[in-house]
Image (cartoon, coloured by chain):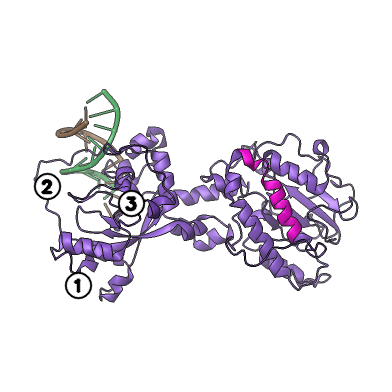
Chain colours: A purple, B green, C brown
Amino acid sequence: MYTKRVVDDALPAGGTRGGGGGAPPTRVGDFSRRAPDYPARCEASVSVAEGERGPMPAFGRQGAVGSVLYTFVVDSGSMAEGIRRATGLCPGRDGLHGVEKVCFSGLRDQREAVSTGVLKRASPTHGPPAPNRPPPDGLMLLDFRNAGKRVDQTNGSPGDGQPCPSSHIPVPRHRKPSGHADKEVMAATVLTSLSTSPLVLHPASSAVVPEPAWKEALSGSYSSSTSGNWSWDASDQSVPSTPSPPLSNDPNNKGFLLSCQGEDSPEDGCPESTHFLFEDPIPRKRKNSMKVMFKCLWKNCEKVLSTSSGIQRHVRTLHLGQISDSDYSDGEEDFYYTEIQVNMDSLSEGLSSLTPTSPTAAGPPPIFPPPLATLIPRSEYISVKGVPGDAPTLLSQSAPSTLCHIRTDHAYQGPLSLVRPVSTEVRRQVGVSGGTAPANKNYALTPPAPKPAPGTRKPRGEAKKCRKVYGMEKREMWCTACRWKKACQRFTD
DNA sequence: CGTGCCGGGCT
DNA sequence: AGCCCGGCACG
């Protein structure tokens, strides 16, 4: 991660000018001090006074007033090298030696872990501890909640009336206001694409690819006023325009993420605003990978189809006993299915981590994320349990039922819920009062299943339960039901 | 014998 | 309702 911050002309004399290994005048989040148990985190702070080192390659050429403090938290070699080049620093003396891989432990997505190169600008109000200003409160880099506000406030402060449209992308003060936002958006977009580029997923290429890429991006965003070569046309809208979710190295943030994951659902544990403010990747992920499915709510039938018409036909023909080839619908079947959203990423993660195997599965398990729609081009069947007579599909063979298993009235909802029920438009259309818990209502309408004869016990499921998965030592990770010695709600059969 | 979870008790 | 656990059945 790379951070640039303007130090408000207040860089103390004898600071870390020149990139010496000494303590920078302002520690932009002193991770090592705050998190002694995070030894792998590296940070190299360097301040460069404009003009002192000659033109800054790539960025820093805009002649920001005063000294500029660059703080890098470097992800092994590649970024370090890029930074060295960008800053013109000597490798051995720039504080980057001994750089170790930045620790992103606790992050689940490797792609997230490589989301380096994201520009951020800490608020100038967090400059070096001025005499009349309290020292920065630690992890200000991560305090995006007020970053923009602070910048705005700073802009309104005397001595700097220049508007600063972004709190994330540093814009030299001298630049004209026009086009600031565009360029910042472009820069952010480019960086976003870089941080999420599949290229960096490859360890072999990650050492090579990022540097020119981010360098180019930076030069594009920062040197566009001087370079005529820059051409980043607006037609490239394929890259997400949302700011990249920079993964901070902040252990607190990590804890935050973990705590979110530990909640029953992201919405419950972490408000959306928090996701946004901390730029947690979850919302974007959901946006990109959530797939709407339709799940049959008929008792003991957990058919999940990808289209509403399919599920309606399923309910109509299989449960309501109506003629299959008739498209007529009286709407009754709408009571027996619900719309769910399946996180395909999580689905794939779950598949890869849990590696459940089905005895009926033949051949290598399918690779999941994109193929769900493509592997089953025409079939709507994504059966997880299968009605007798249904031919098993790839999904039904490979996907653990838990991953698509929905209990809208789950009493023991575990933290690893991968799907969440949502109300359906159809249900509203047929006049069922949505109420506050339409899914529950819908579920309550499920026809009662014939009770098993007393004395008969449900056959033991083959799925690994929380106890097996997590073990006794991680009992707190079990689902509630398992903790209570009840039927596991997470790894159902 | 380890494990899943039913049934029931306690709060 | 939430929580805990004895004890039984299954593999």
**Magenta span dominant secondary structure:** helix
The residue indicated by pointer 3 is A404
Q: Chain of mark 1?
A: A
Q: Could you say whether the residue bearing mark 1 is in a helix, strand or loop?
A: loop
The residue indicated by pointer 1 is A328
Picture coordinates of residue A233, whole percent (x, y): 67, 66
| Tag 1: amino acid | Tyr
Looking at the image, tell me whether mark 1 or mark 2 is earlier in sequence order.
Answer: 1
Q: Is residue A216 magenta?
A: yes
Q: Chain of mark 2?
A: A
Q: Which mark is residue A304?
A: none
Looking at the image, tell me whether mark 2 or mark 3 is earlier in sequence order.
Answer: 3
Q: Could you say whether the residue bearing mark 2 is in a helix, strand or loop?
A: loop
Q: Are marks 2 and 3 on the same chain?
A: yes
- The structure residue drawn at horizontal position 85% and vertical position 54%, both measured from the top left corner, is A11
Q: Chain of mark 3?
A: A
Q: Is residue A299 magenta?
A: no
Picture coordinates of residue A127, whole percent (x, y): 77, 57
A81, A457: nearer the viewer: A81
**Quadrant in the picture for residue A448:** bottom left
The residue indicated by pointer 2 is A452
Whole-number angstrom distance, CA of label 2 to CA of label 3: 24 Å
A67, A36: nearer the viewer: A67
Tag nearer the camera, 2 or 3:
3
Provide the residue span drawn in magenta: A204-220
A291, A37: nearer the viewer: A291
| Tag 3: amino acid | Cys
A102 lies above or below A64: above
| Tag 2: amino acid | Pro
Can residue A233 be seen from the camera position used here? yes
